[in-house]
Image (cartoon, rainbow, N blue to C red):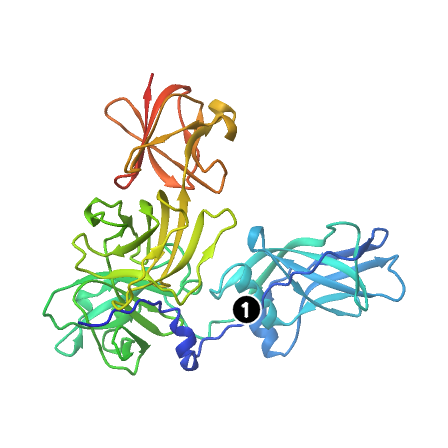
Amino acid sequence: MKKITFFSAIALTLALGACDNFDLPNPPGQSYPAPDGYFENSSLVMSANTEALNLTEANAANEFVTLATISELVNFPEGYDLVVDMNLGSGSKAKTYSTTLVDNKEVTIDPTILNGAVQDVLTKAPGTYTLPVSFSAYAVRGTTRMGLGGLNATYGNGDLTVKTYDAAKVIEDAYYFVPVLNGKADMSKAKKMNNTAGNGVSPYDNPEFALQIEVPEDSELFFVIAPQSALTAGENATIYGGNPSADEMSGKLGTSYGVIKMPVAGSVLVTVNMEADSYTINYAFSVLYAVSGATKPANAMPLYTDNFINYYGVTALNQKFTVYTSADKKGVAFKWDESVETELSENGLELSGAITADSSVTAQIPAPIKGNCLYYVDLNLVLKTYTLKALQTMTVIGSGNGWNLETATPLTPSKDLKTWTATDVEIGDNFKINCNGAWDYDFGGVSVPDVNGQSVYNLNFKGSNMEATPGKYDVKIDFSTLPYVLTLTKK
């Protein structure tokens, strides 16, 4: 039997990066400490460039591009130099970049830096984009940095239109798993792979694609990877073969390599990274069972997945546990990788660490709380990591009690921690389930139809507020199956 190795195609970028030819610059946005002070009386008038900036043309001409022009600068302190930073993008992805001034009249930037900035705050996909831009101005002398115009003053607020570089390597929107029959790729049996970040994500921003397939026992399966364009290209199709690693569970992709042999049978996940030109093969387990003590896996609360990489869910654990891939314990067992240091949160309720499928390891995975406790668990079989979030208490909180944590109604757990109940709870027009008397962990959800006339909700960890008809209810939460269900029974 093959030794099972779990790792990501992305991880191969480091180990095999010497072969890559795809390297677009992506300079980090700057983060400056607060200025030493402000010159509020200084006046600066600046206008953002409204013309589209073609970065390919500017780079070919070895020219900086003009971001903005300065038409007025008065009351500027003597002995200081003017420095202008560009603030590009919006929301949490907005970042700041240095610029170059020409005669204190033009604000310019290297086209390569601007190209990387657009990638950083918006997308790596080549194209023409319009982004919000503003500028911060400073008077600088030595290590002293003084802001102009007062606290948080910005100039030249507007939009910047940028045509970015063409990609050094084209990454198509779709890729296919293609079986090879009698030495030839059979395009009629091609299966489309899914972008691992979900629909609508540019392949330049997430170049990983994956497909779960069933491989019959005692079968000999060979395959290649084909881009969307190959399905209509006929004999001239560009297809990718593989150069496998020693265990054949991963390798490099390339048009000059031969077909790839599937090394295992059963339910498997094939993942490719078209930026790193790499592939991995992992087993695709439908659920995982986190089991403590003498508990049978079939009686444990399963961990679920929608991508065969991340497994998550609510489960009861007693200090230490092992994760099994089958209810009869005959599959793979994940234990604790003690070579990686665990990380415990300040409140002592969250613990992160590493797992391993090495059959020689005996150490069970530790949990942060002594005794039996309910946890929200998140396992990543590619990164081989786990995170446990202890859920010691649960309360009903919402507009019915003014969202007051101190007066929230506590829920009582069953002995196996699978169900939590409360009676005569005053529910307002919206509510949530709070954990541990703080807002670190909570459950929200969405209403679903119920034939018994009750109010029923599918619960999600950190989900949105649940809407209800105000009144008094009995509350029951059931964590025994997915989706997790909360039921309100009218009093």
The picture quadrant where one finds residue 60 is: bottom right
Which of 249/261 is in front?
A: 249
Answer whether residue 343 is visible to the viewer in this image.
Answer: yes
In the picture, measured across the screen, residue 93 lies left or right of residue 417, that is right
Considering every residue shown, the one lying at the far front of the view is 370
Q: Nearer the viewer, residue 172 or 381?
A: 381
Q: Quadrant of the C terminus?
A: top left
Name the residue at 38% across, 51% down: 367
Of 264 and 20, nearer the camera is 264
Q: Percent from the top left, x then y, of residue 77?
A: 88, 61
Could you say which quadrant of the image residue 176 lies in?
Answer: bottom left
What residue lies at 56% left-to-right and 68% top-to-bottom?
115
At label 1, counting other C-alpha atoms closer than 10 Å, the crowd grade (few under 14, some 14-19, many 20 or more) is: some
Q: Is residue 368 left or right of residue 141?
A: left
The residue under label 1 is 26
Image location (x, y in percent) of residue 129: 54, 59
Residue at position x 35%, y 67% in the image:
8
> Is residue 479 toward the left or the right of residue 263 in the image?
right
Q: Position of residue 95 (x, y in %)?
A: 61, 58
Provide the secondary structure element on which disc 1 rests.
loop
Task: Give the quadrant of residue 225.
Answer: bottom left
* Number of numbered callouts drawn: 1
Which amino acid is tagged 1?
Asn
For this orientation, the residue located farthest to the top is: 491
| Residue 16, placed above or below residue 7 | below
- Nearer-the-camera pick, 106 or 20: 20
Residue 193 in sight: no
Q: Quadrant of the N terminus?
A: bottom left
Residue 103 at x, y percent in the picture: 80, 70
In the displayed structure, would residue 162 be above or below residue 439? below
